[in-house]
Image: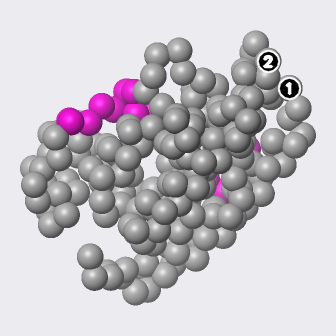
């Protein structure tokens, strides 16, 4: 299965690459996924959405770069969003990606790796669950969250308490593998086309 790991923060001096690098290693070790890391800082989207974004196909009228990003997202069987919590929510860059690529999330599972202060980014995750439900995606129950993330990794970018977080990552990846397989088989048997 193809797993797209979406690195959501585009801020300078962001922590996201550290969390994404660790999680990507866990996903590759899991053995069920081909992993594609999509860093939103390296894939900027135009600020203005087309007026007909919900009726066009996701690749229609896009630049070559946008079509390439669309194709990477569309090819994924499952997603993991790596997100910080900004002001009790998730970054605008993630919402912009979601809105630009309205159809790719349908009938696919999504997991979350979050980081923040005392809530570990969970408020961002809870809000993202609402957004993805509207787009017919399936968010898995278990997540990986880093409370006070600046204390949780050493200078080499490794977790200081690897056993707990590696176990949480495996649990989430197991869920993604199950849902990813079931939903992929379901889409192949019966194309998913609910009313918009």
36 left or right of 120 in image: left
Labels 2 and 1 touching (C-beta < 8 A) = yes
Disc 1 packing (10 Å; few <14; some 14–19; many ≥20): few
99 left or right of 81 in image: left
Name the mark on residue 154: 2
Q: How far across and how far down the image is residue 28, in percent? A: 67, 43
| Secondary structure of residue under mark 1 | loop
Quadrant in the picture for the C terminus: bottom left
Task: Classify 136 as above or below 51.
Answer: below
Q: How is the image coloured?
A: one colour
Name the mark on residue 52: none
User: Which residues are the magenta region?
Assistant: 29-47
* Residue found at x 38% / y 37%: 93
Residue 194 in magenta stretch: no
Disc 2 packing (10 Å; few <14; some 14–19; many ≥20): few
Query: Foreground: 196 or 70?
Result: 196
Query: Foreground: 1 or 12?
Result: 12
* Residue found at x 17% / y 47%: 49
Residue 177 visible in this rendered orientation of the protein? no
Q: How far across and how far down the image is residue 177, in percent? A: 65, 63
102 left or right of 165 in image: left
Task: Classify 3 as above or below 26.
Answer: below
Residue 37 in magenta stretch: yes
Between discs 2 and 1, the one toward the N terminus: 2
Q: How far across and how far down the image is residue 160, in percent? A: 86, 26
* Residue found at x 60% / y 48%: 123
Q: Give the residue at mark 1.
A: 160
């Amino acid at each position: 299965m193809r797993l797209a790991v979406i690195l959501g923060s585009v801020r300078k001096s962001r922590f996201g690459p550290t969390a994404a690098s660790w999680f990507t290693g866990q996903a590759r070790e899991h053995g069920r996924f081909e992993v594609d890391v999509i860093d939103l800082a390296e894939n900027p989207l135009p600020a203005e959405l087309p007026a007909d974004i919900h009726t066009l196909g996701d690749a229609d009228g896009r630049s070559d770069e946008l079509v390439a990003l669309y194709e990477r997202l569309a090819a994924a069987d499952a997603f993991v969003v790596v997100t910080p919590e900004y002001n009790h929510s998730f970054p605008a860059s993630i919402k912009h990606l979601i809105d630009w690529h309205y159809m790719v999330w349908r009938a696919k599972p999504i997991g979350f790796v979050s980081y923040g202060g005392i809530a570990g980014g969970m408020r961002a995750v809870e809000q993202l669950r609402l957004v993805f439900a509207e787009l017919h995606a399936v968010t898995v129950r278990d997540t990986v969250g880093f409370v006070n993330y600046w204390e949780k990794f050493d200078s080499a970018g490794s977790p200081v308490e690897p056993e707990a977080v590696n176990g949480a990552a495996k649990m989430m990846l197991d869920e993604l593998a199950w849902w990813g397989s079931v939903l992929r088989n379901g889409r192949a048997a019966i194309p998913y086309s609910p009313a918009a």
